[in-house]
Amino acid sequence: NAGVMQNPRHLVRRRGQEARLRCSPMKGHSHVYWYRQLPEEGLKFMVYLQKENIIDESGMPKERFSAEFPKEGPSILRIQQVVRGDSAAYFCASLAVPGELFFGEGSRLTVL
Amino acid sequence: QKEVEQDPGPLSVPEGAIVSLNCTYSNSAFQYFMWYRQYSRKGPELLMYTYSSGNKEDGRFTAQVDKSSKYISLFIRDSQPSDSATYLCAMSAGTGNQFYFGTGTSLTVIP
């Protein structure tokens, strides 16, 4: 899974600040998924994007969260006005052939 | 009812044992079935990927899919301490669809 690059690996924000998490998929992959994982819990789907398109955002909170995957550059998950409940590990995954979903190492957000 | 159910464990076995991990699901449209291994504070690592029903073997790992029972399994032979991790099952109906994950089973292999 080293091919999916996420940064920053660790991010600390105070309540009310913005968090931006970046994901560069594996070379040649044009599908990106974002998941959130809380300690001792499973992966919760947030959003599925293709280049310049949001395919499924049914797992995204309606407010404060947004995602994009521009034609050039990484996919970005943006969290505005962070609250303590946003503290979690955020994982990005990119898709090769159907079924082969590869994950990055995650970005761990801590909200103080 | 959750899309995917997985016993969280924890599961503790002696080194060399055969480990059986299982998931059940409810959506008959699922065609792609995966097993991931996740070490603490790391990203999930794809172990096995199976399309539709049947078995797939890779070294010490064997994945089985029984679509008629909506049941998938991962077997680990000759388990090693380095296999100690959380194992996640995942499944999808295909490209353009979500991947649904189990909550993970925590495995400890005791030397």
Image (cartoon, coloured by chain):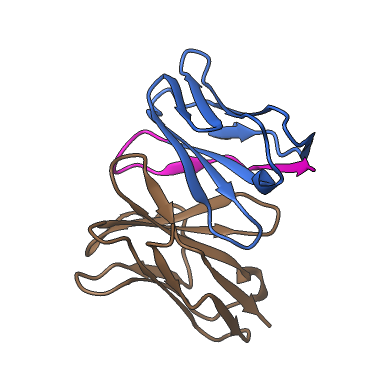
* Residue depicted at x 32% and y 60%: A26
Please tell me which residue is depicted at 57% across the width and 77% down the height of the picture: A10
Quarter of the image for residue A88 reads bottom right
Residue A60's spot in the image, x, y percent? 46, 59
Q: Nearer the viewer, residue B35 or B67?
A: B35
Pick the quarter of the image with the N terminus of chain B: top right
Q: In this picture, is A98 found above or below B18? A: below
Residue A17 shown left or right of residue B96 in the figure? right
Residue span colored magenta: B92-111
- Residue located farthest toward the top when viewing the structure as drawn: B68
Q: Is residue A20 left or right of residue B23?
A: left
Q: Is residue A43 above or below residue A4?
A: above
Residue B3 position within the rendered picture, expressed as x and y whole percent measured from the top left: 53, 34
Quadrant location of residue B92? top left
* Viewer-nearest residue: B73 or A22: B73
Query: Residue A52, position in %: x, y?
Result: 22, 65
Which quarter of the rendering shows the C terminus of chain B?
top right
Residue at point 64%, 59% (across, down): A38
Residue B71: image x %, image y %?
55, 21
Magenta-span inclusion, residue B109: yes
| Residue A25 location, quadrant | bottom left
Say which colour chain A has.
brown
Chain B visual colour: blue
Q: How many marks?
A: 0
Q: Residue at x 59, y 84 (%)?
A: A13
In the displayed orientation, state which residue is furthest to the left.
A71
